[in-house]
Amino acid sequence: MKEKNISLAVIRRLPKYHRYLKEMLDNDIKRISSKELSKVIGFTASQIRQDLNNFGGFGQQGYGYNVEDLYEEIGKILGLTRDYNVIIVGAGNLGQALANYSSFGRLGFKLKAMFDINPKIVGLTIKDIQVLDMDTFETFVNENNVEIVYICTNRDGAQDVADRISKTNVKAIWNFAPVDLKVPEDVVVENVHLIDNLLTLSYFLKEN
Amino acid sequence: MKEKNISLAVIRRLPKYHRYLKEMLDNDIKRISSKELSKVIGFTASQIRQDLNNFGGFGQQGYGYNVEDLYEEIGKILGLTRDYNVIIVGAGNLGQALANYSSFGRLGFKLKAMFDINPKIVGLTIKDIQVLDMDTFETFVNENNVEIVYICTNRDGAQDVADRISKTNVKAIWNFAPVDLKVPEDVVVENVHLIDNLLTLSYFLKEN
DNA sequence: TAGATTGTTAATCGATTAACAATC
DNA sequence: TAGATTGTTAATCGATTAACAATC
């Protein structure tokens, strides 16, 4: 399923489709037209049809879209067809919070271990997950087929972790540190820059 | 400082400028041209000049931009000229993690209390911050001039909290629950949809 | 002054919206 | 069949990039 140059704007809307379709599925809604979906999700009907047609004709003229099918298809596009082994680096408050989120695991992102450099934290067990010493990072990653790392260190530690990741087979980083990581081309990074987000909120609060 | 219709794309870049300028300031860099800034921040020089000129002519021909001045100006645009009283609703793992983030406080976002409905959590003190019962929510918000609420509840509790917020003077919500909140027009919401973010990462990992 | 770099207008590119023929 | 709604092309809108005169 090699799509050619779907724009980032489209990709970022996919999880929202996925979320709304799941909700409809839970509410036993069997089919939905782009017009109806538009009303609840807030995108235009035209945009919805354009978005979906980047990946194939999932609908049916005169009928609309089958909710379950569309939900499954979008899941496939997003890579939710198998499990991924993940680890967390940085077992502070945020790392522990993420470890406790069960919804990630339910989607297939299976937490295998946490890592830290702080001797006070190393050795703890959080939700059945051990906090290991960074000394064993490379060994663990290689032996356990880890594919995704959540970086929950502070700003200063993040690039070091990214450098160590880049020498392994890990190809995806979810970065929560307030810094833009330098990584090889074949490693994808998704940032959660909380401060950037908060400052955007602050801007709009001021403007109101 | 009522700016007219600055696009969202521009606004979302501002915190990144702010972050990079702070770093330069810390490294005693006194001035920067759009061309040099382009190299480190990754936007084109042209875009940088366009962005900044939405808010005024902060530069000087032949010289570039004074790092300290520009940092201050962007801070002003983002509303970092005074403190804001904030509270957290939902004192679970994520709420506690946010309470422990000192960088928000340093920027002026002062945490005044946390709220929860779980009797096991209410009464705790986290980093000098008390966890209060939701019964006292409205009273506290009104008496303490709270302006921003971080919603760290689960999905199902979030809209209820948003409804209660909407009846107070709070005009800004930082929402971490995986749901799109319905709020009055004059309330601004900034979402951190972690799952959406993780699924985007998953998409690109698959595409690689 | 000469060189550098901004501020700003114009050109281009890309994303969203509108329209409608195809078809279930 | 008639009505509804998609898939897709064309039109519009907005954001980014290029170019360059203004000016420090």
Image (cartoon, coloured by chain):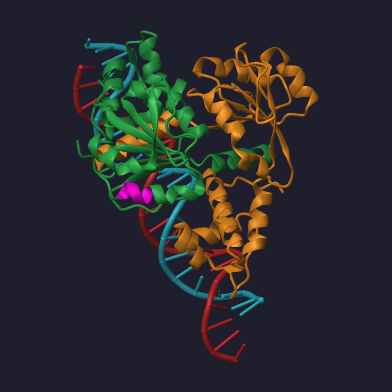
Chain colours: A green, B orange, C red, D cyan
Query: What secondary structure characterizes most of the magenta part?
Result: helix
| Residue A155 appears left or right of B144 | left
Q: Is residue A98 above or below residue A159?
A: above
The residue under the point 36% across, 10% down is A29
Left or right: residue B208 compared with residue B154: left
Does residue A168 sit above or below B91 in this rendering? below
Residue A73 at x, y percent in the picture = 26, 25
On the image, which quarter does residue C8 sit in?
bottom right
Q: Which segment is the magenta one? A: A162-166
Q: Residue furthest top?
A: A28
In the image, taking residue A155 as reference, residue A204 lies left or right, namely right
The residue depicted at 77 percent of the width and 23 percent of the height is: B142
- Look at 48% across and 57% down and name the residue there: B41
Magenta segment: does it hold B77?
no
> Where, quadrant-wise, is the C terminus of chain B in this rendering?
top left
**Which quadrant of the structure image shows residue A32?**
top left
> Does the rendering let one see residue A76?
yes
Q: Is A160 located above or below residue B144 in the figure? A: below
Which residue is more in the foreground, B107 or A85?
A: A85
Is A164 part of what is drawn in magenta?
Answer: yes
* Residue B5 higher or lower than B131, as above or below: below
Residue extending farthest right? B143
Q: Is residue A43 visible?
A: no
